[in-house]
Amino acid sequence: MSDVRCQNVGLRMIKRIKGIWEFKYLIYNLVLRDLKVKYKGTTLGFLWSLLNPLLMLAVYTVVFKYLIGPRVENFTIFLFSALLPWTFLSSAVAMGAGSITDNGNLVKKVYFPREVLPLSVVLVNLFHFFLTFLVLIPALLFFHIQPGFAFLFLVVIIFFQTLFVLGITLIFAALNVYYRDIKHLLEVLLQLWFWVTPIIWPIAIFPEKYQDLLYLNPFTVFVTAYRDVILKNRIPGLLTIAGVMMLGILLFLLGGLIFHKKQRRFAEEI
Amino acid sequence: MNTTLNAIEIKNLSKKFKAYHHRESNLKYVFLNLLKGKRKKLSSEFWALKNIDLDIEKGQTVGFIGCNGSGKSTLLKLISRILYPDGGDIDAHGKISTLIELGSGFHPDLTGRENVYINASILGFSRAEVTKKFQAIVDFSGLEDFIDNPVKTYSSGMYVRLGFSVAINIDPDILLVDEVLAVGDENFQKKCIKKIMDFKKEGKTIIFVSHDLKTVEELCDQVVLLHNGKLVKQGKPVEVISEYHRLLIGASQLQVRKEDPRQGESAPKDRTTWKNRWGSKEVEITGVQFLDLQDNVMEFAKTGQPLRVRIAYDAHKEIENPVFGVAIYSDTGVHVTGPNTRKHNFPIASLKGQGYVEYEMESVPLLPGSYLFSAAIYDYQGLQAYDHWEQYWRFHVIESPEMSERLGLIAIPAKWRMGKSEGKKLRR
């Protein structure tokens, strides 16, 4: 039977996702490869994934609490509730942007859904993000925060952040095939984005009437959601949750569409 | 519509490529053009394939042939979905796999075993399939002893063998093969050919792209000839391959006429700028003609029939005891023959003024194809070149009705005989 042409974008998207699902074993293998290669030959191996955030935690606490002086209550947790999700985003996007071009020899030689490459990068970083929770949770207890019912909302927030991160990664991975400068430009853009997002500074340093403007930066929405749960141990407001969901879905669809459109000429352009 | 008999249906397929003028500074030009407020073209387009219609039956082995740039590899990539068409449709019925060596996709720090699993999943294997095929893959590669070493310790030959072993143990309905049989040593190549024959026996559809016409003829049931992005002919291997030869001849004859108005002087290149010419030029070769025995200029030579090559010279002063030599090379660069007048006991006392020397073959032993021809004049010792034109002329050999040999490079005039070994054992 010849294929029935799907005019409907939604149907086509479902078909595409099914196609990617068929390559789930490849995704699994690529994620496993990245994790294996990362720690191959190191003595501490896997422990680095825990040590890294732990050391970071120590450095930031010392610097801000004892050297610069506290401006925010419970600064370490304040910082980490936003810095860890940020690290997930920035490292996934930075690594993922080159995921198609770095695997050019495969893309040119063999067919597989190209989405698999950025997706596996995002999943690797998601895995590292999860690992940092193994450090975060003892740290919470240390700083006298009892994870409560609100923490269940982390599942929702992380899910939609993953969609958000995936969308951005797809866009940059696709654009980088056509414009190789993107990867370098991205480093600067991510730096800039880090400083304009209330990660290391509190929203409260802005006058109240301008604070709403900060929410034009989509990552501020995620930061607020994470802080509500982790720092304040409370369920995020309806507006925040809705924002997180909308941004996740929006970027996922946008990234998926742009990638799908651009990927037609990947094999020629690499 | 009965589509169950076709493995692949291609309708009105077209593909264009972009050639960039400023590939390295793409983004810069985009910005500059934005600033200038105009859209200057960054690239030009050309059609690699145009309006291809082709049905491939299930269970057939089909070869794609054509010159470089004819579009055959592009067509294969479109079928395998690596490239997307710009027009038309491809419908494939069954699981497609490309037989391709992916050793370059290996990660050097991981072991052979780990890389086999990753590589197989890139080719679309499920987890269960890899586990089932793993032993066969390792056996095929012959790398059992090294499979748990990191592949960075492998030689490049081992890389290729392992990469190819993964690819060849796939189990598709439609197998695409693109020039990969030049992989590994001779033994390994034989193993690969055998494996492809096995696929054929199992009734799989195989599409085969190659320059090696002999393998194409041996393996394929059908051959498709592409030229300049168009499908020229489809049919039985023998017919399509001779059409391809005719096409090659036609193409280069057109070239001869365009560049050299003197008919019959088979000079495909510009005489004055030809780089592979050397010598002191006291005597010069002024031309070479390919003639039949009645001195008619031949458009092409025929296997098994006579050919006379006339080498015209112009000696500016008297030259004593010169030696004329010629050489024939196959299209692939094999030196087929290199006779000269001294070796053939044809002494030439002296040359003065203009004249010619002829090299006559009673029967051309060359099989159909395209050949390069060199001609030279040396002193008697062969130390000083007066004029040497290396591989300057090209001529074509086509098949003649009485000669149907086609494997190898030459046809040796020989006979077959048989008899009975009465009581005596044949020694092996």
Image (cartoon, coloured by chain):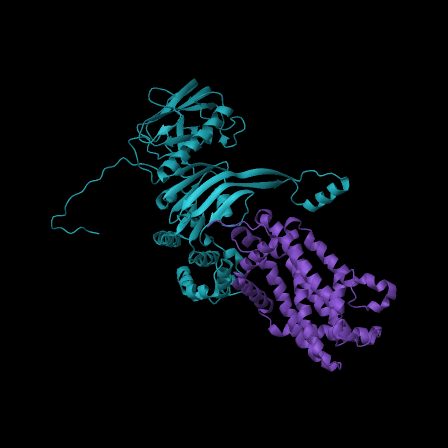
Instruction: Please state which of residues A21 and B306 is positioned toward the viewer in this rendering.
Output: A21
Left or right: B92 with respect to B37?
left
For chain B, the rendered hue is: cyan
> In the displayed structure, would residue B268 be above or below residue B187?
above
> Quarter of the image holding residue B370?
top left
Number of marks: 0
According to the colouring, which chain is purple? Answer: A
The picture places residue B420, in percent across and down from the top left corner, at: 14, 46
Q: Can residue B380 be seen from the camera position used here? A: no
The picture places residue A80, in percent across and down from the top left corner, at: 74, 72
Residue depicted at x 59% and y 67%: A35
> Quarter of the image holding residue A124?
bottom right
The picture places residue A62, in percent across and down from the top left corner, at: 78, 75
Extreme residue in the left direction: B423
Q: Can residue B304 be seen from the camera position used here? A: yes
Instruction: Please state which of residues B193 and B261 is positioned toward the viewer in this rendering.
Output: B193
Instruction: Please state which of residues A168 and A186 is positioned toward the viewer in this rendering.
Output: A168
> Quarter of the image holding residue B40?
top right
Residue depicted at x 50% and y 47%: B77
Instruction: Please state which of residues A43 and B325 is positioned toward the viewer in this rendering.
Output: A43
> In the displayed structure, would residue B200 be above or below residue A216?
above
Extreme residue in the top direction: B353
The picture places residue B90, in percent across and down from the top left corner, at: 49, 46
